[in-house]
Image (cartoon, rainbow, N blue to C red):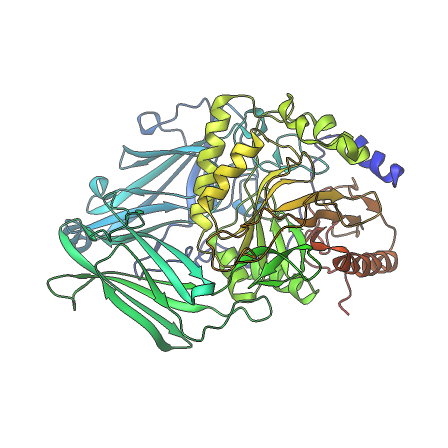
Amino acid sequence: MKIIDAIKTVCLKQENIAVKELKTPWTDQISAENAWKDYPRPQMVRDSYINLNGLWDYAIVDGVSASPDALPSWQGQILVPFSPEAPLSGVKRQLMPGQTLCYQRTFEISEKTYEDSSANHLLLHFGAVDQRCQVYVNGQLVGNHEGGYLPFSLDITSTIQKGTNTLQIFCQDDSDTSYHTRGKQMLKRGGMFYTAQSGIWQTVWMEWVPATYIQSLKLVPDYDESQIRISVQMDGGIDLSASSSAPASITGGASSVICRVQVTSKGKTIAGLSTESSDFSLVIPDFVPWTPENPYLYDLTVELCDAADPTHVIDRVESYFAMRCVTVEQDEKAIARLCLNHKPYFQHGLLDQGYWPDGLLTAPCDEAYIYDIQTMKDAGFNMLRKHCKLEPLRWYYHCDRLGMLVWQDITNGGSSYDMFHLCYRPTILPFTANGAYDRVKGTGRTDPASHAEWYRECETTIRHLYNCPSIVSWVVFNEGWGQFDTEKATAFAKSLDHTRTFDQASGWFDHQGGDMRSIHNYFRKLTCPETNTASQDISDGASGKNSSSANRCGLRAAVISEYGGLALPLPGHITTDQVYGYKNLKSSEEFQSRFQAMMKHILSLEADGLSAAVYTQVSDIEDEVNGLLTYDRKVNKVTVK
């Protein structure tokens, strides 16, 4: 073990040294006129789209009871969707616990639009607001939300008026002083934890929908049966994915409707039907499997039509899907493997934490997402582990279309972590990292309210991202942060998605559950982990074929879910003088040599049974300079061969 490197990491303290500002290649291109105008939900597109990003009035006030009855004096303007802590917001102020961040802007409703609203609904959508908020339209409370990484929507039809309307949002953020979900944010940043941010940090938008409208789709590719299974959920609490043996009638609102579906491939219709059923399937003839090498997507249109006049389209959305399956199966040597489309597929990935020096958790623009994903793919990687955060749906869309597998963390929370027990001791003494440790104080999940919050947010996360074909695995817990009731929590998560694999405990505190034996190894010789799984009979379809489950046999694949972390600070591209990484290097030549040797070695472990490996990481972040890209995305430290 490289004990000196490990001790250097453990001893680094959170000193909250101020960070220097860096610009990405896109920083100077961002303005009030173009800030995140891209359609925010590529998985379900309508023609109606009103973007509310841009300049809003803002104020930060003491106390947590701000409301339209006691409006603050506005302190300036903030560029939404960037948080006030982010340079791109134009504010660059930290919201503290016990304060309220107040937003206000207006929007217009024409007389004709207002008259039409008697037959339509206006939905207000938020991509994410950190950490909790209250939303008012024209002085009326229209909703509350808690959960800083998850989207929510509000029907504001009853509160709008002709002409000018006023939208106000009041936000509070406990950051790391409470048990709420926070990812890697800390008020006292440093080392592996980063600048906390608050308030609106994803797109705010509106859309008009009819009284009877498609609320959501659930798309399940059935690879072995060459079909796509589709469930539709409508407004008014009518759940078209109800698991009834008989098809439910899709009626709701003021009309009886039929559902008309069309699948196209490269502009050519290949499948379609009209149905009154709630849950149906379409055969996809001679389908093209989705892989990172050939990320083939099918276009899908779903229409609700008047049953009395099927030519009358009530609502219409456009989406897409891919034909692929994810399983754990034994290879010819009876080794458990992560498989893509029933073939062992080595998942060579990177930790992707999604931080930016100009926008913090918010990328400056869509092109920045594309750059990160495509650059990592060009470097030879086929997977990204989205770590301790959720991204806007556009990020997953680009992974879907560019061909990048995704492991998605369930974002961590919990009160103060005992880093000695949860990180430092397992790192230096890995034999101490057994399952029992997540039952002691220090994981941050002792409050029953925090347990309930985790279950709610886990379910919302999986349902929200279910239709993204690039996502192949869910990471339930990471290094004990907020870990609790491990077996029960994992079983709950798996009950929500039988089509993907699960990493129960990334790093340590393994309970022999999930679909992987998942370790973090930065300081010891890289070897294939022992899975502690006996060889099992795979006859009669037990390999995973013809099954709704990704892992019928209880097999566990061996993965190294974090490794590497070679640190190379490059002057002019760093934000602090602190250097945090797992092996500090002095030159680009040394970095290149060590990196290429590490890649060669990790790929050789596939022969020993390794199914996946996740290198730390895509980019530098503040003190942490172990990225392949500098924090400003201006230098790629790796020479692609």
51 and 123: which is toward the camera: 123
Q: Residue at x 58, y 46 (%)?
A: 554
574 and 463: which is toward the camera: 463
Residue extending furthest toward the left: 308
Q: Is residue 627 above or below residue 138?
A: below
Q: Is residue 300 above or below residue 163?
A: below
Name the side, left or right, on which 74 lies relative to 570: left
Residue 379 percent coordinates (x, y): 70, 64
Q: Quadrant of the C terminus?
A: bottom right
Residue 498 percent coordinates (x, y): 48, 49
Q: Quadrant of the N terminus?
A: top right
Residue 87 percent coordinates (x, y): 58, 45
Q: Residue at x 60, y 25 (%)?
A: 444
Residue 82 percent coordinates (x, y): 51, 45
Name the side, left or right, on which 453 lies relative to 525: left
Q: Is residue 444 above or below residue 285?
A: above
Name the side, left or right, on which 139 lies relative to 85: left
Q: Residue at x 79, y 42 (%)?
A: 579
Please indicate, yes or no, whether residue 42 appears anywhere in the rendered image: no
